[in-house]
Amino acid sequence: MTRMGMVIGLKPEKIDEYKRLHAAVWPDVLAMISACNIRNYSIFLKEPENLLFSVFDYAGDNYEADMAKMAADPKTQEWWAVCMPCQEPLTTRKAGEWWAGMEEVFFHG
């Protein structure tokens, strides 16, 4: 199991919409998240900085392939088309990233 952490900005005027969307995530999207070996997935919001922090466990053995599978899913693409306009990627993210990956520096299990 690999723990993953990511961060992205959230547009201030989109906070209510983003919360509403995530209070009722589409079942097909949730099923795809599980099918791509993602477990214990949470998203936290830090206001007033408007940063979204996601943390999850990856239980698979080929993260890139699972993420490609997710990205190819039509229902996930629809979900992202609704969510992405709410988000504001960090200018410091790596090439190819939307959510910026973070290094885990501490864990106590």
Image (cartoon, rainbow, N blue to C red):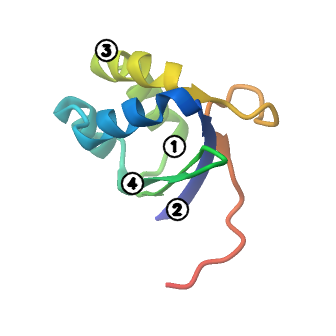
Q: Are marks 3 and 1 in contact (CB under 8 Å)?
A: no
User: Which of the two residues, 102 or 7, is positioned nearer the viewer here?
Assistant: 7
Disc 3/disc 4 C-alpha distance (Å): 21 Å
Query: Which amino acid does the dot numbered 3 rest on?
Result: Pro
| 7 with respect to 56 (left or right) | right
Query: What is the secondary structure assignment of the residue under circle 4?
Result: strand
The first of marks 3 and 1 along the sequence is: 1
Q: Which residue is mark 4?
A: 41
Query: Which amino acid does the dot numbered 2 rest on?
Result: Thr
Q: Which residue is mark 1?
A: 63
Query: Picture coordinates of residue 33 (x, y %)?
Result: 33, 41
Query: Picture coordinates of residue 94 (x, y %)?
Result: 77, 34
Q: Which residue is mark 3?
A: 74
Query: Picture coordinates of residue 47 (x, y %)?
Result: 58, 51
Query: Which amino acid does the dot numbered 4 rest on?
Result: Tyr
Disc 2/disc 3 C-alpha distance (Å): 26 Å
Using the image, tell me which numbered label, if any, was put on residue 2: 2
Query: What is the secondary structure assignment of the residue under circle 2?
Result: strand
| 64 with respect to 88 (left or right) | left
Q: Residue at x 80, y 31 (%)?
A: 91
Disc 2/disc 4 C-alpha distance (Å): 12 Å
